[in-house]
Amino acid sequence: MTKYKLQDAIEKQVATGGRAFIPYIMAGDGGLSKLREQLLFLQQSGATAVELGIPFSDPVADGPTIQEAGKRALAEGTTLRGVLEEIGRLHDEVTIPIVLMTYLNPVFQYGIEAFAKDCAKVGVSGLIVPDLPLEESAMVHDEFIKHDLALVQLVSLTSPAERIERIAKASEGFLYAVTVTGITGARAEFAANVGEHLANLKEVSTVPVMAGFGISTPEQVREMGKLADGVIVGSRIVDALHTGDLDSIRALIAASKAVEII
């Protein structure tokens, strides 16, 4: 399997101490003109990579915070093509990997071959497509491989063991371990079997395991970081950017560097 830039960045972070941290932001929330400022802030604050959401009218995995961010971005006229063009303009400044989180419909509308080609052209490192099941991923995978784009797979708490193993073996860049049963959004606590779930994933996965969904405090970042190779934080980051609470974002990223490895 190809060693993707995304995987390499995560493994380098883990090797040098602490855990990887991937913030999720919604492209175009506040207007695409803010994307440069947002990405450079996250890069300078120590993010390992950035998961960049593409606003979509009918999301299935997003909780209320990210849905509202998507509505704001769509109201600003944000499009997939516009996001890729803006990423291209930032290519020389933003050096950490960018992972696009998009639904399948915008990719179809764009054209799979053209989409993959343009992603590679502007420096996108990987894709997360939550409504694309593993069994249907062949429709995009050849084009993604051709352009060195990692296709990240999500695995849920409720997936049976045989399916978990297939998803883990297929995932590229990292394996996205969903740590709640349901949509994105902050949680006060997690299911009792999360630790066992993440330990199992680390045993069967050949790529780093990143824990995401529901993580919203520095304490949760540290706790999940003990169990995985890193964390993904979305709703809390989106809310903090919207309200200008940059110190909270810095605290979340700093927490990933202070994980006591067990």
Image: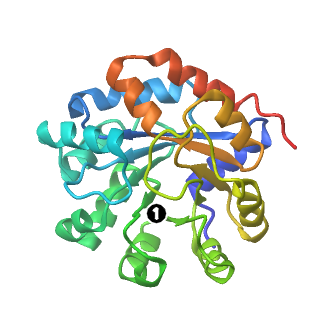
In the image, residue 161 lies at what x, y percent? 68, 78
- Which quarter of the figure has residue 202? bottom right
Q: Name the residue under label 1.
A: 149
The residue closer to the viewer here, 123 or 230, is 230
Where is residue 212? Give x, y as percent.
56, 49
Q: How many marks?
A: 1
| Residue at 55 percent of width and 21 percent of height | 250
Which corner quadrant of the image does residue 130 belong to?
Answer: bottom left
| Residue at image location 25% in from the left, 48% down from the top | 55
* Mark 1 surroundings within 10 Å by alpha-carbon count, few (fewer than 14), some (14 through 19), many (20 or more): many
x and y percentages locating residue 47 in the rendered image? 56, 33
Colouring style: rainbow
**Image quadrant in which the N terminus is located:** bottom right
Query: Which residue reaches farthest right?
Result: 262
Instruction: Out of 71 and 170, give the one closest to the viewer.
Output: 71
Q: Is mark 1 on a helix, strand or loop?
A: loop
In this orientation, does residue 243 appear? Answer: yes
Q: Which residue is at the front of the view, 57 or 2?
A: 57
* Vertical relation: 258 (above or below) 171: above
Percent coordinates x, y for residue 113 in the rendering:
28, 72
As displayed, is residue 173 above or below residue 246?
below
User: In the picture, which quadrant includes the C terminus?
Assistant: top right
**Residue name at image x 61 percent, y 64 percent:** 157
Amino acid of disc 1: Leu
Residue drawn at (66%, 45%) of the image: 230
Q: Can residue 13 be seen here?
A: no
